[in-house]
Amino acid sequence: MTTYVGNTERKRVWKTHKKRGDFDSCPDCGQALRWLYISGEWVPVSHEPVMFILHPDGNRPIIYKRVMYENAILYKRGDPHFDGAQILQGYIQHYYVCPILAKERQEWAKKH
């Protein structure tokens, strides 16, 4: 999606897009993206999948088999949550891992 900052045109990564973006890397940080179509919208995600479990204590949004879950815990060796749990692979929305977007969200939160 293209937005305008002042009079400058800027491609932008949002949580979801109505149309698939015409870029395969983040226009802000340059990380490679993958586009998934879920629930009628296009979602830019990190190119590489991550290992995780779904758990009531989880608080990370994750996309697994084209469904968004809000209760993931990312895999960490030795974490007791993973003992005997089924470890899955899914994708994180780029919106949550882009350092540039994180900085913009922090600056916006300070102002509001």
Image (spheres, rainbow, N blue to C red):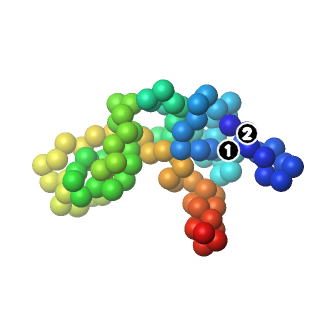
Identify the mark at residue 39; answer none if there is no mark. none
Q: Which residue occupies 81% across, 44% down? A: 9
Q: CA distance from mark 1 to mark 2?
A: 6 Å
User: Looking at the picture, does residue 52 appear above or below residue 112?
Assistant: above
Which residue is nearer to you in this view: 111 or 80? Answer: 111
Q: Amino acid at mark 1?
A: Arg
Question: Where does label 1 land, which residue?
Answer: 12
Q: Residues within 10 Å of mark 2 (few under 14, many from 20)?
A: few
Task: Please identify the residue farthest to the left as the structure is shown.
Answer: 84
Residue that appears at 60% across and 73% down: 110
Per the image, label 1 sits on a secondary structure element best described as loop
| Image location (x, y in percent) of residue 93 | 48, 44
Question: Residue at point 31% right, 50% down?
Answer: 72
**Residue 69 visible, this orientation:** yes
Pick the residue in front: 19 or 31: 19
Q: Which residue is mark 2?
A: 2
**Residue 18 higher or lower than 13, as above or below:** above
Query: Left or right: 72 with respect to 25?
Result: left
Q: Position of residue 49 (x, y in %)?
A: 42, 40
Residue farthest along the front direction in this orientation: 112
**What is the secondary structure assignment of the residue under circle 2?**
strand
Indicate the quadrant containing the N terminus: top left, top right, bottom left or bottom right.
top right
Q: List the single residue furthest toward the bottom.
A: 110
Residue 3 placed where, x, y %? Answer: 74, 43
Q: Is residue 35 visible?
A: no
Q: Amino acid at mark 2?
A: Thr
* Labels 1 and 2 touching (C-beta < 8 A): yes
- For image coordinates 52% across by 36% down, the residue present is 43
Rendered view: 55 above or below 89? below
Q: Is residue 87 left or right of residue 34?
A: left
Q: Earlier in the sequence, mark 1 or mark 2?
A: 2
In which image quadrant can residue 10 be found? top right
